[in-house]
Image (spheres, rainbow, N blue to C red):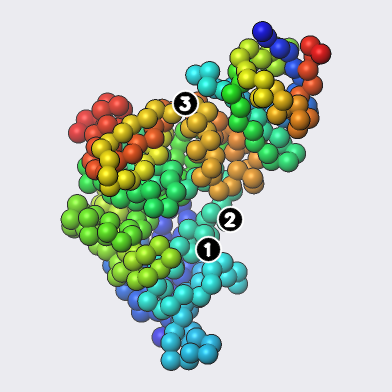
Amino acid sequence: MMHEVILNTVPFSFRVTTNSTLVINNLQRVYGSANLNTAPTENDFAHYSVSLLLQRKVGRPWKQQARFKCDDLEPFLPMDADKSYAMLEWGLNWVIAAHEVSHVIVHAGVLAKDNKAILLPAHPGSGKSTTSCAFMKHGWRLLSDELALITPNTLTVTPFVRPVCLKNASVDIVSEWLPEQAKSDIAPNTHKGDVAHLAPTEISWREKASTASLSAVVLPSYRADTYCEIQPLTHRQAFNQIYEHCFNIGILGAQGFSTLAGIADKVSAYHITFNEADEIVSFIEETLAIAT
Amino acid sequence: MNQTVTLRDGIIPFCFADNSGSVFYDEYSGDILSLALCFSIESGKLLITEYHAYSIEKLEKRGWIVSDDA
């Protein structure tokens, strides 16, 4: 059976067409009814139209595979049907990273408290999402787990609140930290391992339209065998790191360059090696003089 | 020793306030160069105050600067 829903995320909305019950069930569970229009009409607006369709696999017709498309573009190879919800989430990330030009986009988590935002640019596997959840556990609101949307030539970050992608052992760890947050079914054996998507906290949804101002950049690096080690970065080191994780500086050109340079020059940056994410939260709250 | 250079058209310089260096952006190619080099801008020219020789060489090799002191 074919379903059509509109995902009313801010600042972008998505019309999602799917025949996957797994996708529909997980969208309802993770986004909740407040963010999901399950009976859209043709006149209801959405910024992007995407589809996640299950089809019989060529050569193995007894198995279904999931295919993600946006306006007939298919950015990923098909995946097994049990990964369809994770594939949709990754697809939505791709849509914005590939099309959005009014913001500088950095591959990073962003969280805020008292309007002070921290940017967590990081490579996959560095513990970015787990760190984001540690901040949420301490009352910070999530602006994004994947895509920081920065207004050009400012420190302003626009929220793009969506679920946090947890991998492998972090699924159970974070479930203990945030037991009330809804969680998607686990997509097994993806290229990132076993992954599940966790719903943002209530304050994150409630303030999904409130911008925040960047106050610190933290490059988290998880290592099980180490104590917390904090290394301040020079402005130039900070620029190099943020630039490395920027998706669209090539499109924005000089405007993107001056935005990243401005952030690096005005905001304190740290590389933090950790095995206990709470220590990063304590350090940042102390540094930014945020009441706990 | 200070050195004065002229930037090629389309090169945007940015010197960081903590004296850790600077970054340069080529508007035409989109290339970015991050260097251990500090400067101030005087009369549209770069007055380079702190640098490693290889930083100047990198800019010269790309044709992004012309030295006024040569």
Residue type at mark 3 is Thr
What residue sits 40% from the left and 68% below the top? A190
Query: Is label 3 on the same chain as label 1?
Result: yes
Residues at badges 2 and 1 in contact (C-beta under 8 Å)?
A: yes
At mark 3, the secondary structure is loop
Chain at tag 2: A
Query: Is label 2 on the same chain as label 1?
Result: yes
In this view, the residue in front, A21 or B17, is B17
How far apart marks 2 and 3 lie (CA) works out to 32 Å
How far apart marks 3 and 1 lie (CA) works out to 39 Å
Which residue was labeled with disc 3?
A234
What residue sits 44% from the left and 84% below the top? A64
Q: Is residue A38 visible?
A: no
> Which label number is shown at residue A48?
1
In the rendered image, residue A160, in percent from the top left (x then y), is placed at 42, 51
| Quadrant in the picture for residue A157 | top left
Q: Which of marks 3 and 1 is nearer the N terminus?
A: 1
User: Which of label 2 and label 1 is nearer to you?
Assistant: 2
Residue type at mark 2 is His
Residues at badges 3 and 1 in contact (C-beta under 8 Å)?
A: no
What residue sits 71% from the left and 36% below the top? B27
When the figure is inspected, residue A162 is found, relative to residue A112, above or below; the finding is below
| Quadrant in the picture for residue A175 | bottom left
Chain at tag 1: A
What residue sits 64% from the left and 33% below the top? B33
In the rendered image, residue A80, in percent from the top left (x then y), is placed at 43, 78
When the figure is inspected, residue B49 is found, relative to residue A144, above or below; the finding is above
Left or right: where A166 falls relative to B32 = left
Which residue was labeled with disc 2?
A99
Q: Which of marks 2 and 3 is nearer the N terminus?
A: 2
Left or right: where A171 falls relative to A245 = left
